[in-house]
Image (cartoon, rainbow, N blue to C red):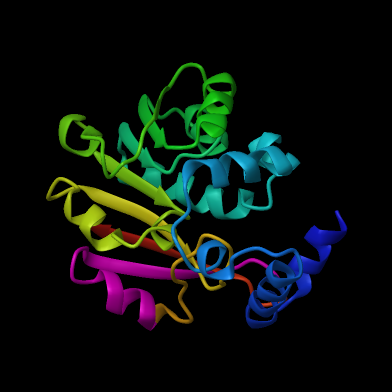
Amino acid sequence: MIKKMIREITPPVLWQSALKFRNLLVGRDTKRKFGAEQPPEFYDQSFEESDHWKKHYTLSHYYPLWTIIADRIRSLGVNKILDIGCGPGQVARLLYDIGVKEYKGLDFSTARIAMARTVCPAYEFYCADVFKDDLLETYNYDCVLIMEFLEHVDQDIDLLKRVRPGTPVLATVPNFAHEGHVRHFNSVAEVESRYSSVLSQLNVATVLKNEGGITYYVLQGTR
């Protein structure tokens, strides 16, 4: 609880510095643990260490952000969603509750996928590495959802290029550094600069999480 409170009020730059200092104190390899892609075990461990991922979606600090995504999905009128980096099923359950007919979630964390299958048994979940899996090519989706995932991988552009042309894409990226983030964004302009070449009609909205400056950028475009 204390860690969460500190995280809420700390500006992103100071939080990055604090994490680096913490890693040094505990003997972690900061080059590996900060600003680099992480293996599935990293996300299994972070899932087990945090009660947040086990809460109902309405109790998550991400809930305001997720409601924006849910509203946009309603507006698009899509019914077959592929969720890359789906996590433990909270978003899936929200989408189920608003009436999304078909959904497939993909994540390479076995712990998170196991939880997702419990949280929303009506949907399908796959434990796989998206860069080694062909679901993007084989599933007949009509929308791709990529929330808090693009910042975790080096090949974010290559991933988006694999989305079927003409498909709506909804994504979110943060403005803060963190363990496992290979990049973050300081402005709408930075997000547009990186992704406008692969997503047409790209719209980027800013969602302020707290007074400390934590911000999420919501991307909506067409592949």
Left or right side of 173 for 134 = left
Magenta stretch: give its range.
Answer: 189-210
In this view, the residue farthest toward the left is: 165
Task: Report whether 206 appears left or right of 84.
Answer: right
Q: In which quarter of the image is residue 164?
A: top left
Q: Is residue 207 visible?
A: yes
Could you tell me residue 63's position as x and y percent?
Answer: 62, 48
Position of residue 173 in the picture relative to residue 58 (left or right): left
Q: Quadrant of the C terminus?
A: bottom left
Q: Can residue 59 be seen in this view?
A: no
- Front residue (pair 125, 132): 132
- 61 is higher (above) or lower (below) than 16: above
The residue lying furthest to the front in this view is 27
Residue 191 counted in the magenta span: yes
x then y, percent, for residue 109:
49, 36
Give the residue at x 17% y 55%. Answer: 161
For this rendering, which residue is in front, 207 or 13? 13
Q: Residue at position x 19%, y 48% from top?
A: 163
Number of marks in picture: 0
Q: In this view, does 218 lie above or below 63?
A: below
Report the residue at 35% width, 39% height from top.
129
Residue sticking out furthest to the right: 2
Please state the horizontal and vertical placement of residue 205, each as a whole percent of the image. 44, 69
Q: Does the magenta stretch include residue 90?
A: no
Q: Residue 213 appears at what percent x and percent y?
A: 65, 77
Q: Which residue is drawn at 44% across and 58% down?
A: 37
